[in-house]
Image: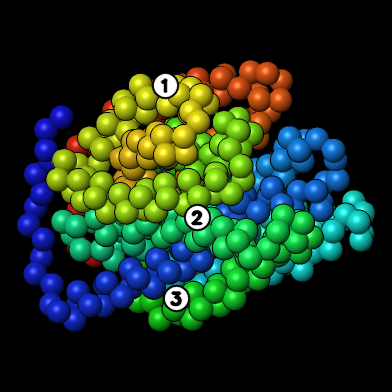
C-alpha cells in the first residue's frame, strides 16, 4: 500500500484557523453530550433492568434491555434520513441544534420514568418510547456532525481533525462509564437499583442544554447554492448518481459498527457474564480501555492523512479479520484484569483504523447537496442492522450455548468490510477543494 500524495493546504489566516477550531470544538461538544446520553443506557442497564423487566433470570433481563437498546438503533435510519434532509436543505447548523434538543428530551424522560412496580407494563413501553426518541436524535447526529466537521476542517488535516468526532463519541462513552464508577463508589448496589441509575440521565439532560447553546454559535458550512438545488437532501438526488457510494458506505459500516459495539458497550457485559469479573472491576477495566481508545483517534486520523483513507480501511479489515476470534477467545479464559484490558486495547487499536476516519471517509464520497443525507442514512441503516443488534445477538447466542458463534459472525462481517474497502477511490472524490 503506497502513500497517497497530499496536495498543499491553503494558507489560512489566524482568524480563519481560530474560527474553524472553535467550530470543531463546538460541534464536538454537542456530539459528546449526545453520545453520553445514548450510552448511559447501556452502562446502567445492569441496574435498572429489574425495575422495568422483573424476571428472576439476569440474562433474560439483559436481553430485554438489550432489545430496547437495539430498538433505539432502528430509529436511526429515520433520523439519518430526516436530519440529513434538514442539513442538506436547511443547513448543517439547524440539524445539529435540533438533534441535541431531541436527545435532551429523551434523557429527561428516562430519568423521570416510573417503574414496573408503579404502573405495570406501561413502564417498559414508555422506556421504549424514550429510547426511540434518542435513537431518532442520534440517527441525525452522526451524519450531520461527520459532514460538518469534514467541511470545516483544514485541508490536508481533515483525517486528523475529523477524528475528533470519535474522540467525543468515545468520550461520551467514557464519561458514561466514569459516572457509573463514581456512583458505584458513593452508593451501594441496592441504592443504584432503586434510584441511583436515574442520576446519569439527569446529568445528560442538563449538559445537553449547554451543548445546545454552543451549537447555536456555529458557522454554516453549506452554501445557499447547494441548499437550493432541487436534488438537495432528496432520496432521488442521492441515488441518481451516488448509489455505488451509498452501498460502499453501508458495506464497511456494517463491519465497523459491529466490532465497535462488540469491544465497547457489549464488552462490559461480556467481562461480567462470560469472563466472570465483578461489575466494578469490569467498569474499571473499560474506563481505562476507553480512555486509551479515545486518545488513539487523532493518531490514526493523522495516519490517514499520510497514507490515505483507503489504506486505513484495508488495514482495519485485514487485522480485524485475523484478530477478532483469537482476542475474544483469549478474553474468556483470562483471570487478570490487566491482561483483559491489554487484549481489549489491542482490539480497539485495530478498530481505530476505521473509527478515526469514520466520518471523513464517508463524507468524501458524496457531493455537498446530498452529503449529510448520504453519510447519515447509509451509516444509520448499517448501524441499526449490525451495530445496534450486537449485544442482542451476542446474548442470544450465549443463552443457547453457542457464544463462540458470535466471534465468527463479527469476523465474517469484517471480511465484508475489507472487500468493500477495495472499492474506495485512492483519492477523495469530493472535499478535495476547500469549501
Q: Height in image: 87 above or below 142?
A: below
> Closer to the N terminus: mark 2 or mark 3?
2
Mark sitting on residue 215: 3
Q: Height in image: 352 above or below 17?
A: above
Closest to the camera, between mark 1 and mark 3, is 1
56 vs 435, nearest the viewer:
56
Q: Residue 306 location, x and y as percent?
A: 14, 45
Q: Do tag 2 and tag 1 residues touch (Cβ < 8 Å)?
A: no
> Closer to the N terminus: mark 2 or mark 1?
2
Disc 3: CA contacts within 10 A as few (<14), some (14-19) or many (>=20): many
- Name the quadrant containing residue 423: top left
Residue 31 visible at all: yes
Q: Do tag 2 and tag 3 residues touch (Cβ < 8 Å)?
A: no
Q: Give the residue pinned by disc 2.
A: 173
Q: Give the residue pinned by disc 1.
A: 326
Question: Which color scheme did the rendering employ for the protein?
Answer: rainbow
Q: Residue at x 45, y 24 (%)?
A: 330
267 vs 359, nearest the viewer:
267
> Closer to the N terminus: mark 1 or mark 3?
3
User: In the displayed structure, does residue 41 sit left or right of residue 90?
Assistant: right
Distance from disc 2 to disc 3, alpha carbons, whole Å, reads 21 Å
174 vs 121, nearest the viewer:
174
Q: Secondary structure at mark 3?
A: helix
- Name the quadrant containing residue 117: bottom right
- Name the quadrant containing residue 191: bottom right
Amino acid at each position: 500500500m503506497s502513500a497517497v500524495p497530499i496536495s498543499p493546504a491553503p494558507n489560512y489566516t489566524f482568524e480563519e484557523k481560530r474560527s474553524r477550531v472553535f467550530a470543531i470544538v463546538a460541534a464536538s461538544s454537542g456530539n459528546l453530550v449526545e453520545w453520553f446520553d445514548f450510552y448511559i443506557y447501556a452502562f446502567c442497564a445492569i441496574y435498572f433492568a429489574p425495575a422495568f423487566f422483573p424476571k428472576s433470570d439476569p440474562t433474560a433481563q439483559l436481553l430485554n434491555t438489550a432489545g430496547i437498546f437495539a430498538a433505539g438503533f432502528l430509529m436511526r435510519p429515520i433520523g439519518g434520513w430526516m436530519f440529513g434532509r434538514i442539513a442538506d436543505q436547511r443547513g448543517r447548523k439547524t440539524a445539529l441544534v435540533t438533534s441535541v434538543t431531541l436527545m435532551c428530551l429523551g434523557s429527561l424522560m428516562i430519568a423521570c420514568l416510573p417503574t414496573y412496580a408503579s404502573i405495570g407494563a406501561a413502564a417498559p413501553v414508555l422506556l421504549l418510547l424514550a429510547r426511540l426518541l434518542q435513537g431518532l436524535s442520534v440517527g441525525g447526529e452522526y451524519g450531520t456532525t461527520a459532514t460538518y466537521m469534514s467541511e470545516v476542517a483544514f485541508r490536508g488535516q481533515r483525517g486528523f481533525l475529523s477524528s475528533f468526532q470519535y474522540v467525543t463519541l468515545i468520550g461520551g462513552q467514557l464519561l458514561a462509564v466514569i459516572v457509573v464508577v463514581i456512583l458505584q463508589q458513593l452508593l451501594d448496589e441496592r441504592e443504584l437499583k432503586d434510584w441511583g441509575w436515574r442520576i446519569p440521565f439527569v446529568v445528560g439532560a442538563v449538559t445537553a442544554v449547554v451543548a445546545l447553546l454552543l451549537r447555536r454559535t456555529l458557522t454554516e458550512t453549506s452554501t445557499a447554492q447547494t441548499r437550493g438545488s432541487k436534488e438537495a437532501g432528496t432520496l432521488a438526488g442521492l441515488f441518481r448518481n451516488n448509489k455505488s457510494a451509498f452501498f460502499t458506505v453501508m458495506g464497511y459500516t456494517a463491519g465497523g459498527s459491529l466490532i465497535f459495539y462488540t469491544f465497547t458497550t457489549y464488552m462490559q457485559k461480556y467481562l461480567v457474564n462470560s469472563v466472570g469479573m465483578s461489575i466494578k472491576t469490569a467498569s474499571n477495566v473499560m474506563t481505562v480501555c476507553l480512555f486509551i481508545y479515545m486518545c488513539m483517534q487523532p493518531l490514526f486520523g493523522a495516519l490517514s492523512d499520510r497514507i490515505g483513507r483507503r489504506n486505513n480501511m484495508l488495514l482495519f479489515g485485514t487485522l480485524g479479520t485475523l484478530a477478532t476470534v483469537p482476542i475474544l477467545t483469549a478474553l474468556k479464559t483470562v483471570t487478570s484484569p490487566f491482561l483483559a484490558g491489554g487484549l481489549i486495547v489491542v482490539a480497539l487499536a485495530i478498530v481505530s483504523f476505521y473509527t478515526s476516519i469514520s466520518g471523513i471517509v464517508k463524507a468524501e464520497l458524496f457531493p455537498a447537496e446530498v452529503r449529510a443525507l448520504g453519510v447519515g442514512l447509509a451509516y444509520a441503516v448499517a448501524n441499526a442492522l449490525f451495530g445496534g443488534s450486537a449485544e442482542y445477538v451476542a446474548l442470544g447466542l450465549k443463552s443457547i450455548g453457542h457464544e463462540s458463534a458470535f466471534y465468527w459472525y463479527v469476523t465474517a462481517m469484517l471480511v465484508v468490510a475489507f472487500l468493500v474497502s477495495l472499492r474506495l477511490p485512492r483519492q477523495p472524490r469530493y472535499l478535495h477543494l476547500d469549501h
